[in-house]
Image (spheres, helix red, strand yellow):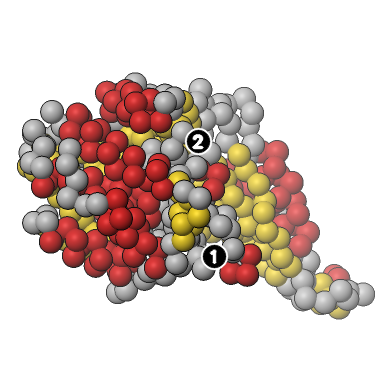
Amino acid sequence: MISVFTEEQKVKILEDLVAIKSVNENEIEVAEYLKKIFEEHGIETSIVPVTDTRVNLVAEIGSGSPVFGISGHMDVVSPGDESKWATDPFVLTEKEGKLYGRGANDMKSGLAALAIAMIDIKENDSLQKGTVRFMATTGEEVGGAGAKKLYEEGYMEDVDALIVAEPSQDVIVYSHKGSMNFKVSSNGQEAHSSMPHLGYNAIDPLTEFITKANTEVRDPSRSNETLGELIMNCTIIQGGQQVNSIPSLATAEFNVRTIPEYDNEEVIDKFNHIAEGLNREGANLTVEVTMSLPSVFTDGKSNLVKIAQALGGKYFGVKPELIGSPGVTDGSNLLRSKGDDFPFMMFGPGLTKMAHKNNEYVDRDVYLKFIDLYEEMIVEFNK
Ligand SMILES: [Zn+2]
């Protein structure tokens, strides 16, 4: 396919995207930038508001079925301590064939590659049938509100296949665990530490809660063939203010990675059950679910996965391995009503292990090749 962009222009688009500081906010600028490029090439777009300041972008070519969903998130994680970067994180910098910058890897390169591929397909009139729906999301790195909104507004209803272009250049992820966060608060009564009977120590029942959760929520007997077992950890604990006071408040936070055989609802029930038991003995524990993203399980046997695997071999010399992953994607929200045979995969430029790191990069060559790969993949799937 003849691209309407030169290599320099393709890199410039990534450079422009990296320059937009969409650190879990401000995605609207990314959406407006992409909207402008799409519209210059006659592609209709719609901005889908998520909050007053945050939006998703949807763009579409073709009509009817199959509908191929292509998706990426517009936010990036914070660059952290910028002195630990060798280059300005918001200035895409090329060194020895690598393009450095926040989001170069996770995942403005994937997002740009999908957008450019779609424009080339449109300009070459290469789509034989069906629709390609580009969905750029807001807030993926914290809670996934953008993808949730797209699901709720029906953008996934008629979608027949979905690719999320997260960094995964050497492996194709066709299933992943869910992710949940809990905050458990224990309320007590403050008293002088020499007279504890006048108060109620908030820490005591909380430590019991943690011990019980560690034994009762973890269940090595249940495992998913691809994803393994559920993982649960208490990761933050806080309580008390002064060493000689009986504490009136203590909190513990937990992160849980769920599997289809042991899902988010069941984990919520277990957390509540443990708290209720301790509350009957005099504790005052409350359980709050602060995030809940379900797991995504597909069988990985779809035509889409086969096409992508063959193209990976063609462009990079080795066929990418098919794997399940512990990390979550927007697939958790987008695929809420899809079955095990749904063609889903995460496959995009950049190495997964590079995501969220200082001095994050994507290989220039890999970024450019993924544009061609996506073009072939989309045309092949919708023929
Ligand atoms: Zn990402």
Q: Is residue 68 left or right of residue 82?
A: left
Above or below, 192 relative to 110: below
Measuring 8% from the left and 41% from the top, which residue is drawn there? 125
Q: Residues within 10 Å of mark 1 (few under 14, many from 20)?
A: some
Task: Locate the N terminus and report the quarter of the image it occupies.
Answer: top left
Callout 1, which amino acid? Thr
Measuring 24% from the left and 61% from the top, which residue is drawn there? 34
In the picture, residue 159 is in which quadrant? Answer: top left
**Residue 355 percent across, percent down from the top left:** 52, 50
Count all numbered tags in the image, as a single digit. Answer: 2
Measuring 12% from the left and 61% from the top, which residue is drawn there? 40
In the picture, residue 245 is in which quadrant? Answer: bottom right
Q: Are marks 2 and 1 in contact (CB under 8 Å)?
A: no
Residues under labels 2 and 1: Cα distance? Answer: 30 Å
Measuring 68% from the left and 59% from the top, which residue is drawn there? 236
Callout 2, which amino acid? Ser
> Considering the numbered disc 1 on the image, is that residue within a helix, a strand or a loop?
loop
Task: Locate the C terminus and report the quarter of the image it occupies.
Answer: top left
> Considering the numbered disc 2 on the image, is that residue within a helix, a strand or a loop?
strand
Which residue is the site of mark 1?
87
